[in-house]
Structure formats: structure tokens, C-alpha cells
Image: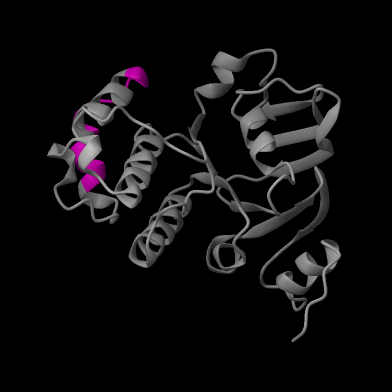
């Protein structure tokens, strides 16, 4: 379980996350939904131990991320909002580097590429500079999924993906969840929430304003727009 307790993060006096408390259960897909600047990325970075909270606590499997970051990170794999790799490297070399970094057997690379369903289409032998933005995003997803970590933290994971890539990504995430992986992803795209999330945490101005399920009768879109102070016409 991931427990976020009264998380506050300030940058030069500006509050990015404001007293966020949230519990994320085992084997669920939780979406952080909100506009740009709502605190989603900062929250994910705090979970991954990549930014130090101003105050509050994040606990993963009973481990305090701030006090024992190395131990906590062993349970996590993180995909940043924008991925970048050296243009001259082969995609396979990128995968091999990150596999060594996370003590993942090299045999898992081909195993994952074959079963992921992301349709890599032999891209592993191509140089990064030859890949489209969508294929680089798929490579980033492959890097994040390689360790088979119990908690997968994804920031805007469908960025740069075409429709086929988005559909294949959703299928992969559902399969990983069914295998027991807990997935937390940030998005501002309502359709991603509808198709993928078990629960949705709506964030505005760094605060959690609603925690709901896509199966509820109230439209998430109506709630989201209402909380944003915008008018929504049916």
C-alpha cells in the first residue's frame, strides 16, 4: 500500500501540493486527474523519492520514502512525463543499461517485448535518433515495466502515443493490474480515466478536491469541470 499523509511541497514559497492525504490500495489503477499545474507531477515525484516534501509523509509497504529512499525505491518503477535517451544508442542498448541498473536479467528484455503487446515491431535494433516520438514513448514504458516492480508510477504515460499505442498501453496496464501490479498515473485527459482507472483523484491547485470512481452515476467530467470553475453544457 502507498500512504500519502498531509503531503505539502513548496517551491520558492509557491505551494505545488497542499496537504494531500491519500491511500492507494494493492492491485488498483489510480488516476491523478487535473489540469497543468495542479500538483500531479510533484505528487508522483514525491512518491518516487525524486523530490523531498516540505512536510508530510509518504509510506510504501511500511517504509518511509523520506527516511529510507533506497529501500522504498526497490518497490517502485517510475516513468517521467518526458523521456529522453541518447540518439546514438540502440533501443536494445537502452533496455540493457536499465536492466543492469535494476538487476533485471537480460532475458526479460525479449520476454517483455514479446508479451507486452505494445507492437515494438523490431525496433530494438534501431538507433534512438531513428525512432518517432511515439516509439520513444513506448521505449520509456518498456524501461519502466522491465523491473516488474509492484508499484508502477507513470506521469502522462500516453504522451506522444497514437491511437493504436494508447489502446495497446491500456491493455498492458489492465493485464499488469490483473497480475497484482499497483498503477498510479497522472493525466489531464478525461478519456484515459474513463477507460483505465479504478479510482480517480481529482486535483486542483495542489489540493485533492474529489476522490471518486468512474462507475459512479455522477459524471466525472461534470465534476471535474465544476471543480475547475468552468461551465459544462450537456
Q: Is residue 13 above or below residue 148?
A: above
Q: Position of residue 143 (x, y in %)?
A: 35, 35
Question: Which residue occupies 84% across, 62% down?
Answer: 227
Question: Which residue occupies 68% across, 34% down?
Answer: 42
Q: Quadrant of the C terminus?
A: bottom right
Q: Which residues are magenta?
A: 101-113
- Position of 61 with respect to 112 (left or right) is right
Q: Position of residue 85 (x, y in %)?
A: 33, 30
Quick check: can you spot residue 175? Answer: yes
- Position of 196 with respect to 87 (left or right) is right
Quick check: can you spot residue 1? Answer: no
Q: Is residue 109 magenta?
A: yes
Question: Which residue occupies 71% across, 71% down?
Answer: 221
- Position of 191 with respect to 131 (left or right) is right
Q: Is residue 24 magenta?
A: no
Q: Residue furthest bottom?
A: 234
Nearest to the observer: residue 130 or residue 146: 130
- Most common SS among magenta residues: helix
Amino acid at each position: 500500500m502507498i500512504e500519502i499523509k498531509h503531503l505539502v511541497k513548496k517551491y520558492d514559497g509557491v505551494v505545488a501540493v497542499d496537504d494531500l492525504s491519500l491511500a492507494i490500495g494493492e492491485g488498483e489503477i489510480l488516476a491523478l486527474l487535473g489540469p497543468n499545474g495542479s500538483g500531479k507531477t510533484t505528487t508522483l515525484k514525491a512518491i518516487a523519492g525524486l523530490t523531498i516534501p516540505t512536510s508530510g509523509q509518504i509510506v510504501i509497504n511500511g517504509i518511509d520514502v523520506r527516511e529510507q529512499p533506497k529501500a522504498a525505491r526497490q518497490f517502485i518503477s517510475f516513468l517521467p512525463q518526458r523521456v529522453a535517451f541518447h540518439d546514438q544508442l540502440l533501443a536494445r542498448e537502452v533496455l540493457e543499461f536499465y536492466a543492469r541498473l535494476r538487476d533485471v536479467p537480460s532475458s526479460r528484455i525479449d520476454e517483455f517485448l514479446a508479451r507486452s503487446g505494445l507492437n515494438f515491431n523490431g525496433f530494438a535494433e534501431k538507433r534512438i535518433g531513428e525512432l518517432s516520438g511515439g516509439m520513444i514513448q513506448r521505449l520509456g514504458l518498456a524501461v519502466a515495466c522491465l523491473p516488474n516492480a509492484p508499484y508502477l508510477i507513470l506521469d502522462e504515460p500516453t504522451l506522444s502515443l497514437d491511437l493504436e499505442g494508447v489502446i495497446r498501453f491500456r491493455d498492458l496496464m489492465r493485464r499488469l493490474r490483473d497480475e497484482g501490479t499497483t498503477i498510479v498515473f497522472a493525466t489531464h485527459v478525461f478519456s484515459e480515466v474513463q477507460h483505465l482507472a479504478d479510482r480517480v483523484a481529482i486535483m486542483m491547485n495542489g489540493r485533492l478536491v474529489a476522490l471518486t470512481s468512474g462507475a459512479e452515476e455522477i459524471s466525472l467530467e461534470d465534476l471535474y469541470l465544476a471543480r475547475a470553475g468552468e461551465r459544462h453544457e450537456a
